[in-house]
Image: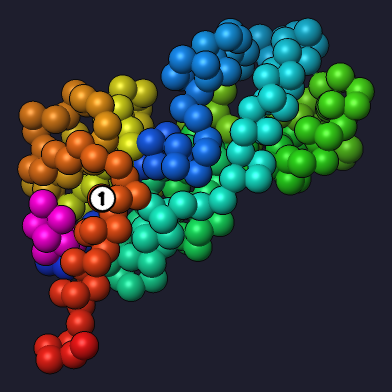
Amino acid sequence: MSEQLAQWLIESGCTIAFTGAGISTESGIPDFRSPGGIWSTSQPVLFDDFVASEEARVEYWRQKSLAAREFADAQPNVGHEILARWEEQGVLRGLITQNIDGLHHLAGSRKVQEIHGTARQVTCLDCGWLDDVGTWVDQYMVTRLAPRCPECDGPLKHATISFGQSLSPEVLEKCSGWARESELFLVMGSSLVVHPAAGMPQLALQQGARLVIINATETPYDDAADLLIRAPLGETLSAVDLAVQKLREPEGGG
């Protein structure tokens, strides 16, 4: 299977990668939906509640500060690094991620669409001011108050898409365009159940793209996949990358 996928990667004129929480678990970041994850013990704060209620904003920051500990020191794993290398080598056209951990950027990927935003920054809901998240998590841990924007005193939240909050139309349009342009759509570590992100493989399939899914559990698209791999991502991508590099070697090269 590794050799087959490597051949498709080399042949494809436009490969788009799509990643979910599964690619980051090997970096020590838990899937928050899993048993023991923060969402199994806390009720997520809805966006409308965050906007309307100071109490909800404090609860939001409590949850986010707990979650920040899970990934603040996390580093990209071999899967992130391989995808960044494929982009640099021209094997990968772009990457769509559902993850908010920022590890693809840390690994060196540049053509990345973070469809659910990033938890490595905060933004002001009133004026759009941006800043790195660390200072504001630290401030909350000391004051236990929801932080306010230093520019306009508006409410600060992580630059992520909360429950009930609309996705960025620009990001969604870019992701949809990539999916439609793809010749090979490579899904990794996603159960493909959170929409509209989970609809991207369908857009690719409608345009005749090959669909490859590497995931530990079943997805709604398994029957439509041209290749389905149930194995750890780091191990799988390492094997595929080895095959890709061999195929990229000049004939007779060593």
Q: Position of residue 192 (x, y in %)?
A: 29, 28
Q: How is the image coloured?
A: rainbow
| Highlighted range, magenta | 1-9
Disc 1 packing (10 Å; few <14; some 14–19; many ≥20): some
Residue farthest right in this picture? 143
In the rendered structure, the answer to whether residue 10 lies left or right of residue 232 reads left
Q: Nearer the viewer, residue 218 or 197?
A: 218
In the rendered structure, the answer to whether residue 6 lies left or right of residue 193 reads left
Numbered circles on residues, count:
1
- Residue appearing at x 61%, y 38% in the figure: 71
Position of the C terminus, as image quadrant, is bottom left
Is 2 contained in the magenta span? yes
Q: Which residue is mark 1?
A: 236
- Residue 127 appearing in the image: yes
Q: Position of residue 101 (x, y in %)?
A: 55, 41
Q: Judge whether 32 appears above or below 152 on screen.
A: above
Residue farthest bottom in this picture? 252
Is 253 contained in the magenta span? no
- Residue appearing at x 36%, y 23% in the figure: 194
What element does badge 1 sit on? helix
In the rendered structure, the answer to whether residue 162 lies left or right of residue 227 reads right
Q: Main secondary structure of the magenta part?
A: helix
Q: Judge whether 67 appears above or below 92 on screen.
A: above
- Residue appearing at x 43%, y 59% in the figure: 81
Q: Position of residue 38 (x, y in %)?
A: 57, 18
Report the amino acid beneath label 1.
Answer: Thr
- Residue 172 appearing in the image: no
Name which quarter of the figure residue 224 lies in.
Answer: top left
